[in-house]
Amino acid sequence: MTQFIELLINGLSLGFTYALLALGFVIIFKSTRVINFAHGSVVLLGAYLIATTADDIGFGLAVLVGVLSSALLAALLYLVVLRRVKGRAADTVTIATIGVDILLATELARRIGQQVLDIGDPWRDDIIRFGTFGVPEARVAAAIIALVLLGAFMAAFKLSRWGVAMRAAAEDGEAAALMGIRLSRVAAGAWFVAGALAAVGAIFLTTFPTPGVDRTAGLVAISAFPAAILGGLDSVVGAVVGALIIGVVVTMASGYQDEFTFLGRGLGQVAPYVVMVLVLLIRPAGLFGTKELTRV
Amino acid sequence: MSERLRSLRGPGRIGWLVLAVLALIAPLFLESFWLQTGLFAMAAAIGAIGLTILTGTAGQLSLAHAFFVAVGAYGYCFFAASGDGLGVATVSGLGLPPLLALVLAVALAGLCGALFSPVSGRLRGIYLGIASIGLVFIGQHILFNATGVTGGFNGRDAEPFSVFGFSFGANEPELSIAGVPFEELERLWYLGLLLLGVAYYYGRRLMESRPGRALETVRDSEVAAAVMGVDVTRYKAAAFTISSMYAGLAGVLLALVFNRIVPESFGLALSVEFLAMIVIGGLGSIRGAVLGGIFVSMLPKLMDKYSDALPFLAQPGAGGGVEPAQAARFAFGAAIVAVLLFAPGGIGSLGRRKLRSTGADDAAPQDTTSPAPRVPARSSAFPPKETA
């Protein structure tokens, strides 16, 4: 039982980290109808910048640098490259993000090489004890910071002018444009926010218990795909719920893998995809996604 | 059609003939590096044709191609291997004749594609793209863990191909033409050409046929397709199945050229490479898929071979500078973006666009394979169902 509750807590905190990435996918999808395959590279850029600058300017400033750079990069990606592919099928733009991802990931992997960089976070490998359960401090911090950010985003999305503009643009782009909403500015803002969230997620994907920033850190972002799809690509709530489910599933599958040896080793990596495919079989638009209606 | 227009249409009949003859006599003068690279390119081209039918013609984004390539490769090894445990670990096999094993492997890949049809038939575009990533990861998990069939991390050997006692692997019967000994690569070269030829011919015929046009309609508007009496779900599932069979065939050829297959070759990176091939070649164009397949698969090998001659490249493993494999990745990442920004029809369409600007819209029969000329039709009768 102790193990179960420990795993559950760890899973939920991992889920909150995934939620930051999944939310990025959803914001970008809602505003531009594109799946951003370059998200992993944005995550890696954030982690790389924070890890390389933390020693000189301190962790706090390094986070600021990393988050702003990732956010700017994402916004620039949209403004410089993807906006120009606009007007054709959304799939084509999605493929363009794959091209961008190859470029960025190759360059970052080249710089990182074989090193495993320490992100320089203040939590180190400390463990907080709640009675009999032990949870890494970094994971607790991840959950708290993610909750604050998610809450702030939800509030901004519901209440601020930017949130209203974004929802209007997602609902009916043409009508929103006629009401004086600048679609490209709203979209660039969405990419900016997604990039910032990705960099924050990057911190907690590379703190204890993971070894640190290596060239494959961006691949973890791919695990957020099932989270976003599971919840429904156009649902903000869905992203969070999907991410929590995936986080718990990953942690449980790795924690209990000794009891599932007949399913093979490395179950934690493949479990999210199994869950995703199963959910899609029953609900093709995800748990909270809008079903696509066809009017004739 | 005037001679001037005909000359704009690419190599023309004589050009193709020269190309075919060159391909046929290539083993006489090419060294083994080029033969092997060429064979990889052929396998890539076959797989790319399959993906362009699915993604370009039927409009279904798939990143699962690597999975089906793996099914073909491992399927062939399983069906053909005699299972006497020559490798490091004992892996099981059925010991069937290689030709039968090839057919069965392709069928198995198709079956896997068909089994995925409850998902592939219902999901659209991007949702399918991501759901299909799941297949790659699940496939990798199986390849690493089902050690009895796949050999696990270390992979397994591929049985050499043979037809009616003529072996493509060993030198029996011994053969040499014009003083050139015909060994494994030379023999496989002709098998590759034959398979590529069949794949190309079948792909072209499919695109120009009734089902091919039905798939294009499904891509442009599912509502319009349904109204015209096309069973959308069935056609989408069928496209997925056919595309998987192409991938399976590519996998068999890869296994034969590699001699030994390991799970790592069939990861998400391979799927992305296939996507790069069809985008660079132009979505929906069979000829473009072949060109893209050759380009993407040969680029890293060429960069590697000529790394000391290219000033901007570092030696592999030397550290500092750009390594050849990385340079190749830069090149095809940039190629994807550049093609999508500046030549959306792919490199195959660059010559053709000139033709259309002269006003001869329906001049070239090849145009049926290109998505570009279809665009006007999209915006006229049936507006595509945009969710945005």
Image (cartoon, helix red, strand yellow):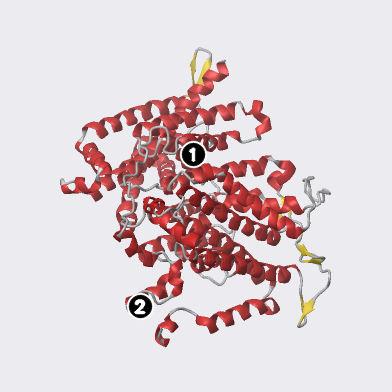
In terms of image quadrants, where is residue B102? bottom right
Determine whether, in the image, residue B14 is placed left or right of residue A145: right
Which residue, given by chain and number where applicable, does mark 2 sit on?
Answer: B360
Q: Chain of mark 1?
A: A
Whole-number angstrom distance, CA of label 1 to CA of label 2: 49 Å
Residue B164 sits above or below residue A150 on the image = below
How many numbered dots are placed on residues in this image? 2
Residue A22 sits above or below residue B203 on the image = above
User: Percent position (x, y) of residue A124?
Assistant: 48, 29
User: Percent position (x, y) of residue A100?
Assistant: 41, 55
Three-letter residue code for mark 2? Ala
**Residue drawn at the location 22% of the way across and 49% of the way down:** A174
**Residue drawn at the location 48% of the way across and 42% of the way down:** A222
User: Percent position (x, y) of residue B66?
Assistant: 57, 52
Residue B56: image tag:
none
Front residue of A220/B374: it is: B374
Front residue of B126/A64: it is: B126
* Disc 1 packing (10 Å; few <14; some 14–19; many ≥20): many
Which residue, given by chain and number where applicable, does mark 1 sit on?
Answer: A223
Three-letter residue code for mark 1? Ser
* Disc 2 packing (10 Å; few <14; some 14–19; many ≥20): few
Q: Chain of mark 2?
A: B
Determine whether, in the image, residue B325 is placed left or right of residue A238: right
